Structure formats: C-alpha cells, structure tokens
Amino acid sequence: MNREIKFKAKRKDNNEWIYGYYSKTDLGTFINQYRVDYEDECTYCEDFEVIPETVSQYTGLKDKNGIEIYENYILKMFQIDYGSESENGYGESIFEYKEVHIEATLNFIYSYELYGEFLDDIEVIGNKFDNPELLDKEVK
C-alpha cells in the first residue's frame, strides 16, 4: 500500500488542530511541520507540542466528497447491509494493522472494512474529540 504518512493532533497551547509528522520524545508529543521561508530561501522545521490522546494518523483514504479520512473521524455510512436489511449508520474510523475499519453501533457492533469501492458510501461528519455527541447519534 503506497500512501502518504501524515498525522494531525490538537496543539497543547491553543487546542487547534495541526497537521504534519508525529514524534514522541522524553520531552513530550509533537507534530513537526516543515516550512519554507521564500524570502530567506531556506527550509526549517517547527515543532508543536500536542495532546497525545488526539494524535490521529491519515488512513490514505478519502470520503465521497474528497475529504481525507483520519483515524478517530466520525463517518456516516450509507446503506449498510447486514443480514436481510439495509440502513444508514454512524461510526468511528479505526486504523490498525494497515487496514481501516469503521466501528459502528446499529443494533449491535458492526465492523465495516473500508476499501476503495465502498468510499462512495462514506462521508466524514466530524471527529470524536470535537463532536463526541455524534457517536451517540441515532441511526436514520
């Protein structure tokens, strides 16, 4: 699987999301951003300390609207088939072992593995840190 490796997390100083490379040291957990200073013609790296629990890795996939899917995103799944019935559902993206799954609660826990052909049925609607109430949303 060839994909871009990148992360996002909430900054410790202002609680805003930052994107970049992840590093964990004895000094803390950081997202590193490489920046270009065109005036001085140089590249430099800036480190931002982040809240460790919010670190989320990019899955390499995009939803039906072209939005990148990170782990811990809340996704709306359209027309999930389970048994002889089909309905919409909500779930959290879980990225593990180089595979992406959605853990959704319908009438039971349902694991829906993401592949390219299913992405037209998935829409990012938030994340579990900023929108935890969406995980309790009723299935419609």
Image (cartoon, rainbow, N blue to C red):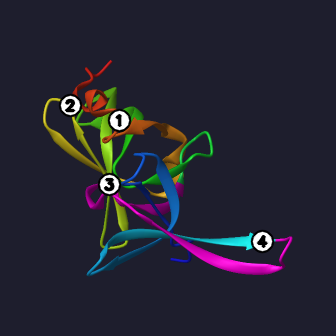
Q: Secondary structure at mark 1?
A: strand
**Which three-letter amino acid code belongs to the residue tagged 1?**
Ile
- Marks 2 and 1, Cα distance to the nearest angstrom? 10 Å
Q: Earlier in the sequence, mark 2 or mark 3?
A: 3
Disc 2 vs disc 1: Cβ atoms closer than 8 Å?
Answer: yes
Disc 3 versus disc 4: nearer the observer: 4
Task: Check disc 4 and report the residue beneath it.
Answer: 37
Left or right: where 116 falls relative to 54: right
**Which three-letter amino acid code belongs to the residue tagged 2?**
Leu
Q: Earlier in the sequence, mark 1 or mark 3?
A: 3
Task: Check disc 2 and report the residue beneath it.
Answer: 106
Disc 2 vs disc 3: Cβ atoms closer than 8 Å?
Answer: no
**Which three-letter amino acid code belongs to the residue tagged 3?**
Thr
Q: Nearer the viewer, residue 61 or 127?
A: 127
Q: Earlier in the sequence, mark 4 or mark 2?
A: 4
Task: Check disc 1 and report the residue beneath it.
Answer: 80
**Which three-letter amino acid code belongs to the residue tagged 4?**
Asp
Magenta-tinted stretch:
38-61
